[in-house]
Image (cartoon, helix red, strand yellow):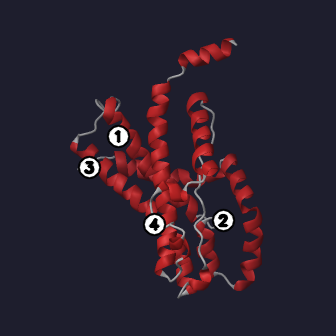
Amino acid sequence: MTLVIVFMENFDLVNLLSNLIPYIVVLLLAISCHEAGHAWMSMKYGDDTAYMLGRVTINPVAHTDPIGTLLIPIVSFVLTFTTGARVPLIGWGKPTPVNPRNWTKYKQANVMVSIAGIGANLILATIGFAIFKTLLETGAINAANAREGIVKVGVIFLNYLIFLNVSLAVFNLLPFPPLDGSKVLQTFLPASFNPIFELLEQYGFLILMLLVYMGVIGVVMYPFYIFVDYLLYTRWF
């Protein structure tokens, strides 16, 4: 009981919400744009399956999975923020339905549809980087005001906009089913590899989650974080 009371006394709800709300907003935007990118590109190659289901939109309602987009990310974030435990911040949206039989150029479409979601995340990250870098270079955001009021919320939002989208792009580039990178790789490999990919598709998600919780994925992503952080916080002019 004493431990619970001490925890509640030290618990900063305002600080939690000022971080959680921008995180969820960016996550919804990132996942929606990612899935909408798949849907839009598939439509461009002749498959209107996703379009007919209302998936060519950045409206989060169309792409949100209650468990993968809301419950798990929120619980993971709150646990990490309040306890300091290293809980991986993972999330996913509803898979975009596509019918490859409708594609006009199968191999080209498979690559383009697969990387369209990654491209959408990189565009968001680039927009966030350009805005944040401009504000830093001009002094609009500086050490004196970065931790105060609306500026603090803006800094948190832009940080998530950049690094969360970079994370999603790099993560999905990994050539491991069911990630987008695996579909690109499969396109260029001989058909004899298809049974291997089909097997990995069955257990890929579980293996992937194991690698995430073991920290392997974090090790892969770390150099990208360092590189983006260096570009962002090193003065150019």
Pointer 3 or 1: first along the chain: 3
Give the image location of residue 195, x and y in percent: 77, 77
How crowded is the residue under tag 3: few (<14 C-alpha within 10 Å), some, or many (20+)? some
Q: Amino acid at mark 1?
A: Gly
Write down the residue under mark 2: 178
Q: Amino acid at mark 4?
A: Gly
Q: Amino acid at mark 2?
A: Pro
Q: Are marks 4 and 3 in contact (CB under 8 Å)?
A: no
| Left or right: 195 as drawn, with respect to 218 | right
How crowded is the residue under tag 1: few (<14 C-alpha within 10 Å), some, or many (20+)? some
Q: Spatial distance from mark 4 to mark 2, Cα to Cα? A: 17 Å
Q: Are marks 2 and 1 in contact (CB under 8 Å)?
A: no
Write down the residue under mark 1: 154
Dividing the picture into quarters, in which one does residue 178 lie? bottom right
Write down the residue under mark 4: 119
- Judging from the image, what secondary structure is the residue with disc 2 in? loop
Q: Is residue 52 above or below residue 108?
A: above
The numbered disc on residue 134 is 3
Pointer 4 or 2: first along the chain: 4
Q: Residue drawn at (46%, 79%), measured in percent from left and top?
A: 44
